[in-house]
Each structure stands twice: as structure tokens, then as C-alpha cells.
Amino acid sequence: MAVQPHFDRRALLRGGLTVGAAGALGLTGAGLASAATRSTGAAAPEPRVYTTAEWGARPPSSGINILDHVPTYVVVHHTASPGNSEDYSLEHAMEICRNIQTYHMDSNGWADSGQQFTNSRGGFVLEGRHESLDVVRGGTRHVQGANVGGHNSEIIGIENEGLYTEVDVPKALWDSLVGLVAWIAGQYGRPVEHIMGHRDFNSTECPGEVLYGRLQELRDAVAGTLGVRSVAPAVWPLLRPGDTGARVRAAQHLLRAKGFADLPVDGVFGASTRRAVATLADTHDIEQHACAALHHSKVDETGYLGSDLWPLITPGRVRAGGTDEVAKAVETLRRSAGRERAGAGSELSTLDWKRLLA
């Protein structure tokens, strides 16, 4: 998760009542919380959260920024480093928090831990950034952290100890995650479709393929706790080196339309596609946001095509005639899904593209 704070240069908000939309409606601060709460049912009980004082946190190096509005999204991370420990003790959970804070402050130069909460493999929930617990209890404001590039004013982030690219989370961690997210969503009146993963905002593996694959199960569990309807959000896919198929072929057509004319369209995410994606990110000053420093030293996520890059290559209109690269991308996706042919000059919204790529 170790990402630099990168504030809203290209914040592409995913549906619902966003902070910007709320401001336009005159709903900020307590007014936004009150309006949002009407969309939820029963409140969830507050879990036992060990405070920064209890786990021995260092004082922040500068003031904590508390924003006068509620967060829009609850975001799930995995720590990736140091891996999947078999030590499920509270003492180990506290040590993890101290190690994360040390790295974020001393290596990244941040004021404090980047995440608002940490959830251990033993099922212990700990406060991350100072003041996060009391501010969530209030239900009307937001401690700004540093855990999702470009969206930190909208995000409350939960670090889940471990690496979940191939293995599942322990039951204790899962149960505590459900309880924590349900409490946060209830406090802030967040709809369950705003429970997201880190990769829904940046081109990163985080929170791991396995944990990410369970996010709808998490939304369903939270919805059951709160007594509300569960909804699955439309999201951008993450494409990585080694991937194959229609989505890769469509991405290659779209990259060719953006000037990478020599890129082959073979449906294989190989070295040339990776270079094109990396160049696209550099050209548009999109910073890379890795899960964790140690994990990133072994797994290079450069050239991953995810949520912060798809909007750069998915235009809003398919040109009449249907022979250009964008039209070919659309037809590739439609054929793959068994859908009817797109009409000439079709308008395509962000939601349309997400559905095509699903």
C-alpha cells in the first residue's frame, strides 16, 4: 500500500453522492452525513479498536488533517509485506502497526501512518493514523490519510495484514473486517457499493486477487448487518503482463488509437503492451502506487493497466463507419460477450466501458 499522497488531480469518482456533488447540492459536513445515513438501515456495533496510544505509536510529525465531510469510499488493502505470519497475537498486531508507521514516516516522509485502520491476521483491529477512531465515532468528518493515490480526501483505508494474491484470509481477519467495515459504513451512511479495493483507484494488485475477489461477499455481509440491499459496483478491470483474451486485445486497439501505432493486436499482454502502458502512465504523470515496499521489490507493477489508466484510453464516442481502432476495440468486447454490434456514432459513457470490459 505504500503510496505517496497525491491529491485529486484526476479524481474520477465512481457513482453515488461524491464530495463534489455534495458541495453542489449544499450538503457538506454534518449535512452530508445526515443525508447519506438515510440510505442505510440499522447501525452496526463498534468493534474493539486498539488506539494509537495502546500500540505505542509515535506522535505524528505534523498536524492531522481532519476534513469537514464524510469519506465517500471504504477501501480494502493488504499489507503484502511481511507476508502471512502464523503469529496471531495482539502483540504481533501491535508490532505490525509500529513497523508500518516507521516505514511511512521515515521512508515515505509522511506525517503518520497512511491508513486509518489496521486489521491483523489474528482479528485484532487497530487505529492507524492518529484521531481516526474518534473522528469515525463522530460520523460527520474524515481524517485524511495517505493510502490511495489521487483520492485520499475521499477514502478511509483499512490495511489487512498479509499477502492475498494466492491464499485466502484467515477467518479471524475476515470476521473482524466485516465488523469494522459495517461499523464505518453505518457511521458514515455509506452505501455498500462504495466498499472498494485499492485497485479500483490505482493500477496495483492490492488487495490481492483472492481478497479482491471476495469484496462482493464483503458487501453482502455488510449489507446483511446493516439491513440494506447489497449492490455490486461497476469497476475497471486490472490487466497485467501474462494476461490474454478479448480485454487485452481491446486494450491494444485502444492504445493504438492513442498513438502506439506499432503495438501488435494479438490478445497477449506481453512486453510491448507493458511498455506502451508504462509510457502512457509516464506521459500523463500517473504515479505508480505499490502495495508495499518489500513486496514491490519482488513484484514490479510497472505497466499494469488499471483504474487510473483506462479513462485515458476509453473515449466517449465510437466514430461512424466503425473501422477505426476504437470501434475495433468495442466490437472485440461485444463479440466476446455475445452482444449485438455497436451502431455507428455510438455514445459510450464510463459505465458503458466498464460493462463492456466486465
Image (cartoon, helix red, strand yellow):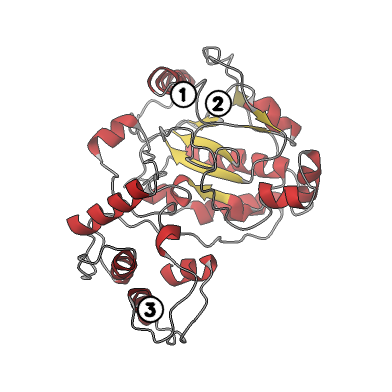
Residue on which the image places disc 2: 126
Residue on which the image places disc 3: 327
Query: Tag 1 or tag 3, which sits nearer the N-term?
Result: 1
Is 107 drawn above or below residue 183 in the view shown?
A: above
Is label 3 in contact with label 1 (beta carbons under 8 Å)? no
Residue on which the image places disc 1: 93
Total numbered labels:
3
Spot occupied by residue 89 in the image (x, y as percentages of width and height)? 45, 23
* Figure quadrant of the C terminus: bottom left
Say which amino acid is labelled 3: Ala
Q: Is 261 or 57 nearer to us in this picture?
A: 261
Say which amino acid is labelled 2: Leu
Q: Quadrant of residue 145?
A: top right
| Circle 3 SS class | helix
Residue 171: in sight, yes or no?
no
| Circle 1 SS class | helix
Spot occupied by residue 205 in the image (x, y as percentages of width and height)? 36, 47
Q: Quadrant of residue 127?
A: top right
Spot occupied by residue 328 in the image (x, y as percentages of width and height)? 34, 78
User: Residue 125 — which label?
Assistant: none
> Which circle, 3 or 2, is nearer the viewer?
3
Is 68 drawn above or below residue 217 in the view shown?
A: above
Q: Residue at x 44, y 72 (%)?
A: 356
